[in-house]
Image (cartoon, rainbow, N blue to C red):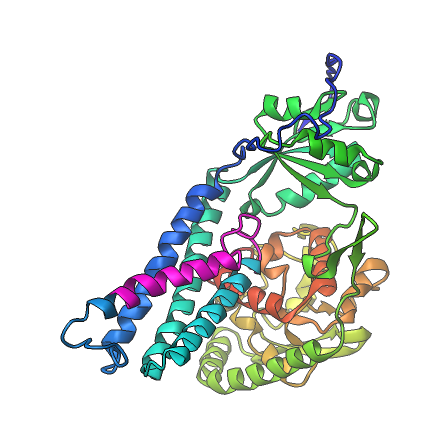
Amino acid sequence: MRHVDSFEIQPPTPPSHNGVPRSAWARARRRVSRWHRPYTAALLLLDFAAVVLADWIAQEAFGQARAGFYNAQADPTWFYTVVFLLVPLGWLVALWGNRAYDRRYLGLGPEEYKRVIRGGVAVTATVSFVAFATKTDLSRYTVGFALAGALVLVLLFRITARFVLHRIRGRAGHAGHRMVLVGTLPECLEVYTAVTRNPSAGLVPVAIHITDGYAAARGIQTPVPVYAGRDVLALVREVGGDTIAVCGSASAEPGELRRLAWQLEGSGVDLVVAPQLTDIAGPRVHIRPIEGLPLLHVEEPTLSGPALLAKNLMDRIAAGLGLLLLVPVFLAIGLAIRLSDPGPVFFRQPRVGHEGRTFRVWKFRTMYVNAEERLAGLVDQNETDGMLFKMKQDPRVFPVGRFLRASSLDELPQLINVLWGEMSLVGPRPLPADDGDFLGDVRRRLLVRPGMTGLWQVSGRSDLSWDEAVRLDLYYVDNWSLAYDLSILWRTVGVVLARKGAY
């Protein structure tokens, strides 16, 4: 953190670019941020290789792979050209046409994968149409296997590429966007906090340009240098930035945002707007232009309807199958608990669930039977804030229980709660019924069923502060979707294997 203790008067700002002097034929400078170019090139190679690999496996697996190709047995040149060159190139064209290489969707969020799937559908439709139009009698099993296999491999290769990208961003701080935040100091600091929560997003604020005057920042500690009264484009070049983020009310000044966009034409600097809407995901936000005025329309959270019905159905089916498959694991864990400490295998505690209804959660017991009596003597050693008691080396936990907690195996019996409809696979974690009043923002967690895993669990678990855990829970409530649930379940696997924040 640093104090704002200096202020440099900038020479008179040159006249703003109004879009007129620039030649209509002049080419814009290349973008300052260039991480996406080698990344896109790598994706092109990976996608091509994925399709070639899927086609090779299909033609090796099925004896009728060459069916429909004229004289393919005697001279397979045309067959190999189509299968290993034209079809992969067709995939690349389809992916490009569906903007699966658009830098705005690369490296973060599910939109990239959605566009890959759309590209796969386009390739399937094209192959089907060409085969029908030319009356080519292809092997349906071979073609189907090749198309489905190519889609799966493309997605797997892209997941791997994104993982590598995130590792580079997290460790080296490269392959990202260096941002200059423009707005009032409180707005810029709020955006700074939001974009730095997830280093894998690749957004790195390097400076703040305040619009409410130098006096508003005097003596305040800030994580990056603060400037005032400067030409924004000159400041961006001075600090080595490539993106300007206009925060909050700064984007509402009449004509200023438009003039800034004109000024940035041909500069290679990106312009983004961070409105005063925090913790609202993209699917709920739509831009509706009316008479030249772009209105940002925010949809209500989806807390009912077909999607919720599908979520409940998925929960019940997965819980039922999980309980059947995990019977041997339950028996082994139960035996280990009884050998560690005489007493019940399961621990049941009242928790607050959907719409404030109380239920008893199922867990494997991980503490000695006298744990509740010993709690009073450990309260002053609590290592977290908020409603929950957390202690990394809790003496009430026996050795097997410590392993169960670290591996999250103690949570498996909650599949019973999911099967009974008291919990969901994904949702805010259920809190003890006697630990809080659930007033204010915290009560909004009760709009959905509590979950076995949730956004807090894949974002730090017990290492998070209470306020941060509540923020993540509320974000989930306001922005949940089936795709988001599947994403959290996938991330849970990695978090559990890493045993991060579990104690």
Q: Does residue 236 appear to the left or right of 323 in the view shown?
A: right
Whether residue 196 is visible: yes
Residue 412 vs 115, above or below: the answer is: below
Q: Which quadrant of the figure has residue 114?
A: bottom right
- Percent x, y of residue 281: 69, 57
Q: Is residue 440 left or right of residue 152?
A: right
Q: Quadrant of residue 420?
A: bottom right
Q: Residue at x 67, y 56 (%)?
A: 378
Q: Nearer the viewer, residue 54 or 376?
A: 54
Point out the image quarter for the N terminus.
Answer: top right
Tell me which residue sits at (59%, 47%) in the image: 198
381 to the left or right of 118: right
Where's residue 187, x and y in %?
77, 38
Q: Residue lying farthest left?
A: 74
Q: Nearer the viewer, residue 449 or 57?
A: 57
* Coordinates of residue 210 in the picture (x, y in percent): 76, 28
- Seen in the picture, residue 123 relative to 193 is either above or below; the reply is below
In the foreground, 124 or 360: 124
x and y percent of residue 33 in the render? 53, 36
Residue 391 visible in rendering: no
- Magenta segment: 81-110
Report the quarter where the C terminus lies.
bottom right
Q: Residue at x 61, y 65 (%)?
A: 484
Count all numbered tags in the image, as a single digit.
0
Determine if the magenta segment contains residue 415. Answer: no
Q: Left or right: 189 with respect to 120?
A: right
User: Does residue 102 show up magenta in the picture?
Assistant: yes
